[in-house]
């Protein structure tokens, strides 16, 4: 049975922490999980790589990075993905990346994708590990 906990639930007290910071500069080292939700898609390759390298530098060999973002299909691209891609390019200097394009960025940051989990919505969850 799935159990849900709120942030003030005693069952998870002391087991999590949120930290305010600048992921271009540093993130706390040695966490079990790092989560980047809707971060990479609106950044250029250079800025995305800076963020991924910052996270990689903080990760232990057992850490995982979860990237929650749209992963553009290689074929039969839906119109909504095309519109989002154009918006990311013109407004934010980013782009909606395919799994292959994301893998190239991850590889350049000494990371690798373990799996891509689609969701019922437009986003997927990409589980990432250190190389």
Image (cartoon, rainbow, N blue to C red):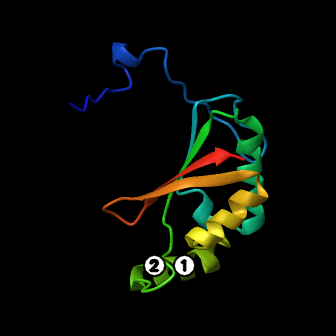
Callouts 2 and 1 close, C-beta under 8 Å:
yes
- Residue 17: x and y in percent read 54, 25
Q: How dense is the environment of label 2, judged by Cα within 10 Å: few (below 14), some, or many (20 and up)?
A: some
- Residue 40: x and y in percent read 62, 60
In depth, the one of 84 and 57 nearer the eye is 57
**What residue sits right under mark 2 in the picture?**
81
Tally of numbered discs: 2
**What residue sits right under mark 1 in the picture?**
85
- Residue 37: x and y in percent read 52, 52
Label 1: element kind: helix
Q: Quadrant of residue 48?
A: bottom right
Q: How dense is the environment of label 1, judged by Cα within 10 Å: few (below 14), some, or many (20 and up)?
A: many
Residue at position x 70%, y 32% in the image: 60
Residue 128 shown left or right of residue 5 in the figure: right
Q: Quadrant of residue 5?
A: top left
- Residue 119: x and y in percent read 35, 59
In depth, the one of 21 and 2 nearer the eye is 2
Q: Quadrant of residue 50?
A: bottom right
Decide if residue 43 is in sight here: no
Residue at position x 40%, y 83% in the image: 78
Quadrant of the drawing holding the N terminus: top left
Residue 70 shown left or right of residue 45 in the figure: left
In depth, the one of 21 and 50 nearer the eye is 50
Up the image or down, 54 lies above or below 33; here it is: below
């Amino acid at each position: 049975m799935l159990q849900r906990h709120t942030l003030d639930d005693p069952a998870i007290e002391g087991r999590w922490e949120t930290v305010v910071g600048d992921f271009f500069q540093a993130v706390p080292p040695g966490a079990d999980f790092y989560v980047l939700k809707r971060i990479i898609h609106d950044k250029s390759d250079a800025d995305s790589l800076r963020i991924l390298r910052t996270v990689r530098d903080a990760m232990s060999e057992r850490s995982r990075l979860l990237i929650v973002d749209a992963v553009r299909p290689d074929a039969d691209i839906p119109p909504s993905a095309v519109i989002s891609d154009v918006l990311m390019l013109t407004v934010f200097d980013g782009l909606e990346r395919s799994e292959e394009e994301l893998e190239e960025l991850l590889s350049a940051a000494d990371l690798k994708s373990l799996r891509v989990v689609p969701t019922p919505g437009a986003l997927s969850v990409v589980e990432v590990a250190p190389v």
